[in-house]
Image (spheres, helix red, strand yellow):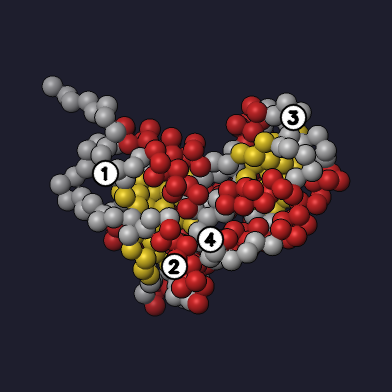
Amino acid sequence: MELTYNRPMQNPNFLIIDSGVGGLSIWQEIQRLIPNSHTCYVADNGGYPYGTMEENALVQRLLTLLPELERQYRPDIIVIACNTASTIVLEPLRAQTQTPVIGVVPAIKPAAALSQSRHILLLATPGTVRRQYIDRLIEDFGQGCTFKRIGSHELVHEAEQKIRERPVNQDIINKVLEPLRQIDTDIDVVILGCTHFPFLADEIRHALPTPIRILDSGQAIARRAQQLLVDLKPRNQDHIPLPGNLFLFTEETEQTHQLEAGIQHFGFDKIGFFRLTATQNAQKSGAT
Ligand code: DGL
């Protein structure tokens, strides 16, 4: 008789990656919904910021880094907790791994369902707003709504500052959102299309000309992960559960030490470094 498993896999291991601390907004939602999970969170600060990196360089970087991480930490699910990366790397990554991969992309469909005025703002990194992937998402799921796009790396920096427990510069946020006052006053939904931005939700709300609904992808990603766990077979004998929640940087800098206290407050059990070998680093930077 064939057994069917309709209980979600217990104590799953997640591998979550972003260029910095932004993906913690996704991790928090996963933790809330799947508290028995353990995560190896990777802040690829050696590649930060992704939002201004050339597309091929970013894809190559992740296709080098992720298999190494996967070999070492044996995740049940990989989460690309970065819109800038997901919008270009999901296809090649899925082609090279057996592990299910969830990618965070802007919440175009829920925004279109929510908007009354049918005018929506996508706030993301400069890389994300110009991706063809976004054009396709809007075409397929935008329900004919008008989408304005603002790309900002300043907001990514301000979010990193906030997690570093440094003051956020409201003037910078106001300036980024200034075009909204001119371009379209009908906008009634703002999509936070960068995982760093939910940490600035209050500051963004403060900078908006009128009360506007703000949407991010965190809860939807956590629900997707939960769904996937129902489909996953119970783990193999050789599965090595993570001993807790682990936070890894890819490069040791002054900033990583400034972030330590903030990261500990999120509840990580250990903070460390994942260093690529010299050969992998050469491949990663495109050197031969
Ligand atoms: N958090 C990333 C995103 O969701 C981008 C951060 C960066 O530019 O490095 O797009």
State the image coordinates of residue 45 (x, y, percent, origin top left).
Answer: 50, 67
The three-letter amino acid code for the residue at tag 1 is Asn
Q: CA distance from mark 3 to mark 2?
A: 42 Å
User: What amino acid is found at the position of numbered circle 2 in the picture?
Assistant: Glu
**Amino acid tagged 3:** Arg
Q: Tell me the quarter of the picture where residue 283 sits.
A: bottom left
User: Which callout, 3 or 2, points at the residue further toward the start of the chain?
Assistant: 3
Look at the image and tell me whether residue 88 can be seen: no
Q: Earlier in the sequence, mark 2 or mark 1?
A: 1
Q: Is mark 4 within 8 Å of ligand 1?
A: no
Q: Residues within 10 Å of mark 2 (few under 14, many from 20)?
A: some
CA gap, disc 2 to disc 1? Answer: 26 Å
Does the CB distance between marks 3 and 1 fall below 8 Å?
A: no
- Image quarter hosting the N terminus: top left
How many C-alpha atoms fall within 10 Å of the one at disc 1: few (<14), some, or many (≥20)?
some
Indicate which disc, 2 or 4, sits on the residue closer to the N terminus.
4
10 Å neighbourhood of mark 4: few (<14), some, or many (≥20)? Answer: many
Counting residues from the start of the chain, the first of labels 1 and 4 encountered is: 1
Residue under label 3, please give it.
Answer: 118
In-front residue for pair 166/278: 166
Between label 2 and label 1, give the one nearer the viewer.
Answer: 2
Vertical arrangement, residue 110 with respect to residue 256, above or below? above
The answer to whether the residue labelled 2 contacts the one labelled 4, judged by CB atoms less than 8 Å apart, is no
* Residue 11 disc label: 1
Amino acid on which disc 4 is placed: Ile
Q: CA distance from mark 3 to mark 1?
A: 42 Å
Q: Nearer the viewer, mark 3 or mark 4?
A: 4
Measure the C-alpha gap from mark 3 to mark 4.
34 Å
Q: Which numbered dot is residue 260? A: 2
Give the residue displayed 26% in from the left and 44% down from the top: 11
Q: Tag 3's secondary structure?
A: loop
